[in-house]
Image (cartoon, rainbow, N blue to C red):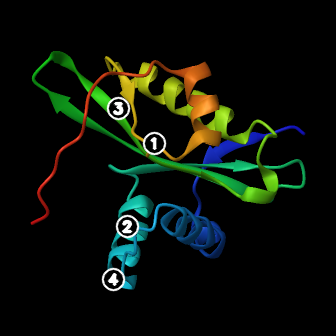
Amino acid sequence: MPITIRALAPADKDRWKELWEGYLTFYEAPIDDTNTATLWERLMADADPHCLVACDDAGRVIGMVQYLFHATTWSAADKCYLQDLFVDPNARIGGAGRALIEAVYEKAAKAGASEVYWMTQQFNSVARVLYDRVGELTPFIKYRKLM
């Protein structure tokens, strides 16, 4: 199935929200409506973060990726953090995930970023098959403190 990647548009709001909620459900990460509304506003401002969508041959949005650029102490060039990637479960294994990741690679290269990186949970075995093909697993372990 041919996949088209394009920027998120205002008309995509309802479908984007469905995909966003699917992503949050998958990761068991509840985010309230206020945060979702703020994210949408940021995405529409065409600043960090950014969002691309994957469309099938009928033009239906079947996936999304959200990413941002940030400075780093390890390089003079910014890094690109691919923060959220989700493809409709009914459209998986059709190349949309790979196409979205590769589109972020293109945006990062055009912006002069030194690296694109992302995280996933260990249990995300299906996605990790793709990630092993398009990226390099690092030895880093994440720690955090919620504020």
Q: Circle 3 — which element?
A: strand
Type of residue at label 3?
Cys
Residue bearing the label numbered 1: 122
Location of the N terminus by quadrant is top right
| Residue, disc 2 | 39
In the shown orientation, is residue 139 left or right of residue 56? left
Q: Residue at x 42, y 26 (%)?
A: 108
**What residue is drawn where x is 32% and y is 49%?**
48
Disc on the earlier residue, 3 or 4: 4
Q: Whole-Å distance between the Cαs marked 1 and 3?
A: 21 Å
Counting residues from the start of the chain, the first of labels 2 and 1 encountered is 2
Name the residue carrying label 3. Answer: 80
Above-or-below relation of 120 to 45? above
Tell me residue 30's x, y (percent): 40, 75
Secondary element at tag 4: helix
Q: CA distance from mark 1 to mark 4?
A: 29 Å
Specify the quadrant of the image occupied by residue 29. bottom left
Numbered tag placed on residue 19 in the rendering: none
Which quadrant, please, contains the C terminus? bottom left
The quarter of the displayed image where residue 113 is located: top left
Label 1 CA crowd tier, 10 Å (few <14, some 14–19, many 20+): few
Query: Label 1 is placed on what type of residue?
Result: Gln
Residue shown at 30%/22% (left/top)?
A: 139
Q: Which residue is mark 4?
A: 34
Alpha carbon distance from label 2 to label 1: 26 Å
